[in-house]
Structures are given as structure tokens and as C-alpha cells.
Image (spheres, grey):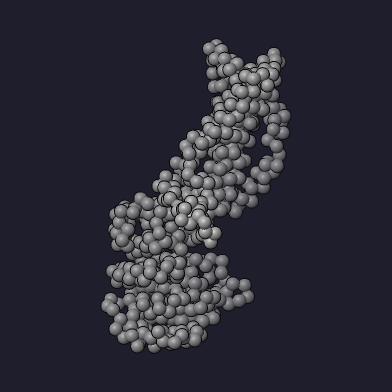
């Protein structure tokens, strides 16, 4: 277990249960006078897929950025414990435009077999043969797949994804859900997926945490027959609809008539 | 050119389709707003037109040879000066001065830009003085440089260097500061070291700015060269022209101008060639 360097967050190795990959206690973050996170507690078990759901402005991206160690200039307090190897996937693919696809995947890898592993990761996301392409030559979905390859080639113990499919069209998004599910099944990282899409959360996560006004409002488990990261087609359509209504209710949205 | 080929798909324009010509509810589609496909030698068109104008007005007697020599006289003069070796000799000296000044200016400008762009201390120390230097016309420093270094080569190269490093610094620094913060975050999440961050993110990101500065710098080097060679020199193209002025030899003056022009065109073309090779990843209007 490692804690991010910097003064804001204290190291507390003994309060972390050894069975959890991520442990957040009483996390407070604020921009100016306004509190964005007002005391968040969160645990993620190794290999567990957690979706963080909430309306925009509820602090879900702030929480993810805190876990990624990207909140240098943000005021706050609390205890964060994350694994050694953390990968982040952003909403934009964030590929360096001046580097090839392969160069982007190997970015920051120090091992001598980095290139071999990067080629393997690219094959895994279905982009074998595109190693020498420039990012701008790829479609949005392909760019995001390169970003996935870049994050998985590091064999992360924790994968942080900040609305990774938010900028993709609906069809591509569904394909990417399948790809992400397969990749997570193969690599078994703990995952924290930030999303505002209820259906995406149900389709992918084992557990859904709803954040509201900087606090954890509700936590709901997704049964395997409804959705989640486990393989297999969901069978319980009624249960799916019920969970969907509950989540929309948690989010303060009046669910539309059953489809 | 593969990207350009994709953009150059044939567009069906309804106003050219006879079946749709009469309808006013159909508007042309697929009209391109960018400037279109590049032509390899298109840049020669403008200079070619100027040359043609010059030739025609000289041949028709519209242009007095005492005002501006005829193109063929200039070519003949070039032949004579090449034959007795004066042109090569002066050209070599001029090229050496410009080359040295350019080299030192690029090195100094790029290093200062990196130092100033990557650290707050560097910025506080360097950016102010460079902005002050920018406000002083480079040629106004010549009297002081002559007092300090005399009129030998050091003064000449230094004058050119001082003119060159400013645009290199300004554009590289702007390019560096313009690097998207998102890439800096990315570098952090993939655990890049400081050295790798500079090599993988900062330098490639600042390269477009550097090349823009380089184009200004190359032009600036020739401008400074003309001045230092016409004020106090005993060799070089500028000296050759200055000497010709005292004898009223318009043809040599025009030849000198033509040489400067050709040198400027060639060097700008070379920089643009380098830029296209180094920035193949860019997809811009220039194509």
C-alpha cells in the first residue's frame, strides 16, 4: 500500500484492512469556500468493480482525482490508501498527438520488454497492426481503446476511469462496455468507474456508490443476474428495471415510464 | 499526404447537377473551408510574377537602367563576379557570419526558453530581461558592441546572435507554456520521471513554437547581416554592395539584393522542409 506524497493526506497503513485495495476515510476537499467532498468513506476490494454515480457537480471527479493523486492545489483533509500501481483512463483519450500509438502505450514504461508488452496490449484491445499510426488517424473509439491499452499494460492493481466512454457514440459505447468487461476479467484490477450513466453503471459494476453533495448517499450491490462485471448475460429483466428505478430515485430523477 | 487524400473526397455539389440546378431549396454541400490541396511549387508563382514584371518593364524601356538594372545585366554581372571569384568569396564570408550568428542564437534562445518555461525561478530571472531586450531595436546596440568588441567578426556575429535569440526564445517559450495541462497530468499518472517528461512531452510539445521562431530568426539573421556588413566591413555581400554604391554600379547592388533574396528564400524553404519532416503528426490547414 502506498499513499500519495504531499502534505494533505496522512498515511495510515494500520487502519486499512489488508483485504481492501482502496480505502478512503473522511475525505474532505474544497475549492474556495465551497465544500466539494464533505467526508467521504469508501472501500474497494481487490478485483472489485465499483461504479461511482452522481449528478454533475456532486464531487465524483474530485474523488477520482484525489485517488489518482492529481489534486495538488486543492484544499482538504482525510486519509487515502491506494495500491502501488494505479492507472487512470480519462474521458478524453489523452494520447500525445506527437507520438505514435505504440509510443503512447509504452509511455513511462521502464522495463526492457516494454514494446513487446505494448504490442500485446494493443492486440488485446483489437488494434494489432496500428502501432505506427498517429493518434489523429484513429477514430474516437479507437483512441479510447489505445488509452485502455496504455492503462492495462502497466498491470494496475487499481484502474480509475473518469467517464471513459462519455464522449463516444452509443453504439461504440456498448462495444467498449464489452471490451472493458473482458479486460477487467482478464487482468482483475480493482476498478473505480466514474459515470453519470445509470445503465452503464448497472452493466459493468458489482457495486454502485451514489454520491450526492459530496457525501456517499447510497450503496447498492448489483446481483450477477442483473448485470455487473461477471461474465454471462443478465437474465433478471425485472430486477434490472427495479435497480434502475432505485438508482434514478437516489439521483433525484423521476424515472420515466417503464420501457 | 494520406490525410489530405481523405479530405479531398469528391464532393457532389447539387448546383452542378443538372437535375437539381433549377431548385433553390438545394444548397451546395461539401464545400471546403480550408485552403485545399498543396501544390509543390506553388510558392514560386509570386516571385515568378515579380520577375516577369521586371523583365517586361526593362525590355520595353519603361524602367530606366540607371534606376534599376535590367535582369540580363544582373545575370551578366553575376557571371563576371563569379569568374573573378569575388562573388563566391564575399558570399562565403556572409554565409559564415549568418550561420554562426544563427547557430549561437538558436542555442541561447532555446536554452533560455527551456529554463524559463520549466521553472518559476527561471521565468522570474529570464523573462523580464528578454522582454526588455525585445523592446530595444537590435541595431541600436551596434554602437555599444563596436565600442566593446571593435569592428571584427565577434561584433558582427554577436549582433546577429542578439537578433536571432529573441524570436527563438519568445516562440519556444510560448509553445512550451501552451502545452495542454492534460498532458502534464497524464505524464504524472504514468509515472514519468522529470527527464522523460521533458523528452516525451515538453520538447515535442514546444517544437511547433520553436519552428515558428526559427522562421523569424532566419529572416532576422539576414537582416542583421545586411546592416553589419554595410556599416563597417571590408568583405561580404553587404560590403560589395556598399562599394558598388560609391561607383554608381546599380547592377552590382541589384545583384546583391538578388543574392540576399535567394538566400532568404532558400533558408526559409529549408526551415519549412525541416518543420514538415519534424511535425508529421500535425494536421493543420497548411497540410
Residue A249, percent across and down?
Answer: 47, 87
x then y, percent, for residue A45? 36, 77
Q: Is residue B179 above or below residue B266?
A: below
Q: Is residue A157 left or right of residue B171?
A: left
In the image: residue B32, left or right of residue A122 = right
- Is A227 left or right of B33, judged from the image as shown? left
Q: Quadrant of the N terminus of chain A?
A: bottom left
For the point 48% across and 42% down, the residue is B38
Quadrant where the C terminus of chain A lies? Answer: bottom left
Horizontal and vertical percent for residue B142? Answer: 70, 30
Q: Position of residue A8 (x, y in %)?
A: 53, 70
Residue A43 in view, yes or no: no
Above or below — where is B225 with respect to B164?
above
Quarter-wise, where is residue A135 in the image? bottom left
B287 vs B132, nearest the viewer: B287
The answer to whether residue A155 is seen in the rendering is yes
Task: Identify the image quadrant of residue B191.
Answer: bottom left
Residue at image coords 60%, 22%:
B55
- Where B83 falls versus A208 (above or below)? above
Total numbered labels: 0
Residue most extreme to the top: B84
Q: Nearer the viewer, residue A193 or B124?
A: A193
Residue visible at 46% across and 86% down in the picture? A255
Q: Residue at x 68, y 21 (%)?
A: B62
Question: Would residue B131 appear left or right of A100 to someone viewing this image?
Answer: right
Amino acid at each position: 500500500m502506498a499513499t500519495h506524497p504531499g502534505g494533505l493526506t496522512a498515511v495510515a497503513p494500520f487502519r486499512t484492512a489488508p483485504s481492501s485495495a482502496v480505502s478512503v476515510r473522511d475525505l474532505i476537499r474544497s475549492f474556495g469556500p465551497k465544500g466539494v467532498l464533505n467526508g467521504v468513506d469508501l472501500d474497494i476490494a481487490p478485483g472489485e468493480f465499483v461504479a461511482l454515480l452522481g449528478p454533475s457537480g456532486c464531487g465524483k471527479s474530485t474523488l477520482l482525482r484525489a485517488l489518482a493523486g492529481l489534486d495538488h492545489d486543492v484544499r482538504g483533509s482525510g486519509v487515502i490508501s491506494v495500491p502501488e500501481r494505479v492507472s487512470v483512463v480519462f474521458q478524453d483519450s489523452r494520447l500525445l498527438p506527437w507520438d505514435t500509438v505504440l509510443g503512447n502505450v509504452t509511455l513511462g514504461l521502464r522495463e526492457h520488454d516494454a514494446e513487446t508488452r505494448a504490442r500485446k496490449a494493443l492486440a488485446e484491445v483489437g488494434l494489432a497492426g496500428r502501432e505506427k499510426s498517429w493518434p489523429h488517424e484513429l477514430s474516437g473509439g479507437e483512441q479510447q481503446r489505445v488509452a485502455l491499452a496504455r492503462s492495462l499494460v502497466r498491470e494496475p492493481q487499481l484502474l480509475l476511469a473518469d467517464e471513459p466512454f462519455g464522449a463516444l457514440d452509443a453504439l461504440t459505447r456498448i462495444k467498449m462496455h464489452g471490451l472493458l468487461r473482458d479486460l477487467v476479467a482478464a487482468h482483475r484490477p480493482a476498478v473505480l468507474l466514474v459515470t453519470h450513466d445509470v445503465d452503464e453503471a448497472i452493466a459493468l459494476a458489482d457495486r454502485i456508490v451514489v454520491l450526492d453533495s459530496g457525501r456517499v448517499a447510497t450503496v447498492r450491490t448489483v446481483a450477477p443476474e442483473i448485470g455487473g462485471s461477471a461474465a454471462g448475460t443478465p437474465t433478471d429483466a425485472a430486477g434490472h428495471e427495479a435497480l434502475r428505478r432505485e438508482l434514478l430515485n437516489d439521483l433525484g430523477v423521476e424515472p420515466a415510464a417503464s420501457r | 499526404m494520406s490525410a489530405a487524400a481523405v479530405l479531398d473526397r469528391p464532393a457532389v455539389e447539387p448546383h452542378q447537377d443538372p437535375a437539381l440546378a433549377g431548385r433553390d431549396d438545394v444548397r451546395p454541400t461539401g464545400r471546403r473551408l480550408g485552403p485545399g490541396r498543396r501544390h509543390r511549387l506553388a510558392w514560386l508563382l509570386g516571385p515568378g510574377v515579380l520577375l516577369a514584371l521586371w523583365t517586361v518593364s526593362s525590355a520595353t524601356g519603361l524602367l530606366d537602367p540607371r534606376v534599376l538594372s535590367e535582369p540580363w545585366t544582373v545575370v551578366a554581372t553575376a557571371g563576371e563576379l563569379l569568374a573573378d571569384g569575388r562573388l563566391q568569396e564575399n558570399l562565403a564570408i556572409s554565409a559564415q557570419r549568418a550561420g554562426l550568428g544563427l547557430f549561437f542564437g538558436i542555442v541561447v534562445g532555446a536554452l533560455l526558453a527551456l529554463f524559463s518555461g520549466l521553472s518559476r525561478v527561471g521565468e522570474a530571472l529570464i523573462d523580464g530581461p528578454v522582454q526588455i531586450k525585445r523592446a530595444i531595436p537590435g541595431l541600436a546596440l551596434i554602437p555599444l558592441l563596436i565600442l566593446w568588441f571593435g569592428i571584427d567578426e565577434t561584433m558582427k556575429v554577436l549582433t546577429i546572435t542578439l537578433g536571432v535569440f529573441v524570436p527563438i526564445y519568445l516562440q519556444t517559450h510560448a509553445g512550451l507554456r501552451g502545452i495542454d495541462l492534460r498532458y502534464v497530468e497524464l505524464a504524472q499518472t504514468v509515472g514519468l520521471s522529470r527527464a522523460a517528461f521533458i523528452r516525451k512531452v515538453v520538447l515535442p510539445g514546444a517544437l511547433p513554437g520553436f519552428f515558428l521562431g526559427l522562421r523569424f530568426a532566419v529572416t532576422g539573421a539576414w537582416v542583421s547581416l545586411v546592416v553589419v556588413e554595410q556599416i563597417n566591413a571590408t568583405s561580404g555581400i553587404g560590403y560589395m554592395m556598399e562599394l558598388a554604391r560609391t561607383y554608381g554600379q546599380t547592377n552590382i547592388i541589384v545583384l546583391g539584393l538578388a543574392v540576399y533574396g535567394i538566400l532568404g528564400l532558400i533558408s526559409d524553404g529549408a526551415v519549412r522542409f525541416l518543420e514538415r519532416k519534424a511535425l508529421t503528426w500535425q494536421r493543420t490547414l497548411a497540410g
